[in-house]
Image (cartoon, rainbow, N blue to C red):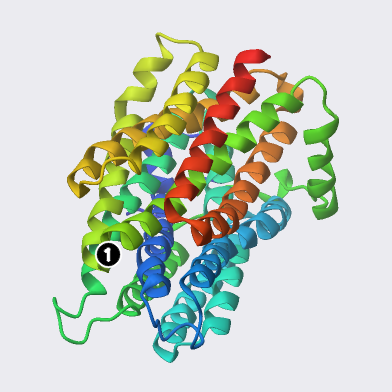
Amino acid sequence: MAQVNIAAGPHKSASAFGSLLPLYVVIFFGFVGYSLMITIFTPIFLTPGSAMLPSGVTSSHSKIILGIVLGLYPAGQFIGSPVLGALSDRYGRRPVLLISLTITTICYAVIAASLEALSLATLCASLFVAGVSEANIVTAQSAIADVVAAEDRNRFFGYIYMCVSLAYIVGPLAGGKLAEPSVVSWFNYSTPFWVVFGLLVLTTLGTLLKFRETNPPEKRQQISYFEAFTNLAGVFTDRRIRMLYLINFLLYLAIFGFFRCYPMYLVDEFHLGVSRESEYIAWVGVPIVLANLWLTGYLAKHFTTRALTFWPGLLTGIFMIVVVVPPNRAALWVTLFLTSLALAICLPSCATMLSTAVGEADQGRVMGNNQALQVGAESLSGLLGGLLAAIMVKLSLVVLGIVAIAAAGVLLLI
C-alpha cells in the first residue's frame, strides 16, 4: 500500500479508500476479538464447575457473573469514547489511534493470560481497560469525515459496518475451532485471544507504517470531556426528540441483549460446546452482511425511515420470542436468521430517524448522544440479560423481545 499523505483535504473515492484502508483493517481485527468474548466466555462461565468461578457458585450466579463480564467492555467504551474522540480532535487521529491500539493489544494478551491463570479479577480488569482504550470506530468515523466528500460518506461509513459484520462471522468460526482441544490437542479457551493479540501486533505496526494523519494541526480544536457528558442531558430535556431517544434506547437494549442472551440459551438449553456454539454465532452474522450489502439500501428507497424502524423493531421482538419456542435445535437456523435480519435493518434506521428529526446544527450533539445511548444500552444489556437468565434463560429472550415490541408500540403512538 502506498504511503499517501491525506492531510490536505478530501480526495477522490479510490484514493480516499486506499488511504483509509488501515482503519478498516483495524476495525475488522478489533471486532474479531470482540466477537470472541461472547463466543468463548459463554461456555466458560456456564459449564458446571467452571474453574474460572469460585467453588460452590450456583448456575444462577454464574449467569449473573457472565452478564457482568460481557458488560465490562462496552462500559469501558462508554467512558472512553468521549475522551478519545476529544483527544483525536485536539492532537490528531494518528497518535490517538496508535496509543489506543497499543493498549488494546496489550489487553488482549492479558485477557489470554488471565484465562490460562483462571483469574476472574484480572480478566474483568483487562476487559474494562480494553473497552476504555477502544477508539477504532470513533477515530475511523472522524478520519472519514476528514478526507471524504459529504456525498460519499454514507458509503464509506457503510464499509465500517461491513467490516464489523464480517468480523462477527470470521471471529466466532475461527475462534470456536481455536478453542477446541479436539481440533488440536494444545488448543484451549485462551488460544483465540493469543491469536488476536498477534494479529493486533501486526495491525499496530501496519498502522504505524501506512496510516497518515487526516486531521492537520490548523483544523484541530479542543473539546471538553465534561461537555461531552453534559450534552447527554439533552436526552431528557429536548422535548422535540426525547421520545425518539427513548425508542432508540429500548431497541438498542433489546438488540444488544439478544447478542448476549441467545448464546446463553444455546449452551444452557442444548448443551453446545464452543465449536458448535460458534457456528450458530457466525450464522447470525450472515443476514447482517446481507442487509448491509443490499437489503437495507433497497428498502430505504421504497419505505420511510419511520416504517423501517417500526416494522423491523416489531419483528425483532417477535422473532426473539419465537427463538425459544421450537424444541428442535434445527429450527434455530431459521429463527436466529430471521431475528438477525430484522435487527440488521432496524439498527441503522434508529440513527437515521433521529438524525432526520433535527437540523444540521444539532447533528453532532444529537448523534453523539445517540452513540452514548447505544453503548450504554449495550453495557446494561449484559447485566440485565444475566439477571433474567439467572431466573430462566428463556425468560431473558422473551423479556427483551417484549422490550423491542414496546419500543415499536411507542413509535406508533407518537
Residue 343 in percent (x, y) is at 43, 34
Name the residue that disc number 1 marks: 271
Residue 352 in percent (x, y) is at 56, 24
Query: Which residue is at the front of the view, 313 or 30?
Result: 313
Residue 275 in percent (x, y) is at 22, 65
Query: Which residue is at the front of the view, 269 or 68?
Result: 269
**Rendering quarter of residue 71:** bottom right
- Identify the secondary structure beneath mark 1: loop
Residue 18 horizontal side relative to residue 148, left or right: left
**Rendering quarter of residue 292:** top left
Is 44 situated above or below 298?
below
Q: Is residue 152 visible?
A: no
Is 184 situated above or below 204?
below
Q: Which residue is at a point 49% across and 66% down the rendered structure image?
A: 63
Is 239 situated above or below 237?
above
Residue 288 in percent (x, y) is at 34, 38
The quarter of the rendered structure image containing the N terminus is bottom left
Q: Residue furthest top?
A: 302
Instruction: Please state which amino acid type lies under the numbered disc 1.
Output: His
The quarter of the rendered structure image containing the C terminus is top right
Give the number of callouts: 1
Residue 277 horizontal side relative to residue 239, left or right: left
Query: Which residue is at the front of the view, 372 or 41?
Result: 41
Q: Is residue 89 visible?
A: yes
Is 10 situated above or below 64?
above
Q: Residue furthest left?
A: 183
Q: Which residue is at a point 25% across and 63% down the rendered structure image?
A: 272
Residue 356 horizontal side relative to residue 43, left or right: right
**Rendering quarter of residue 297:** top left
Local crowd at mark 1 within 10 Å, few (<14), some, or many (≥20)?
Answer: some
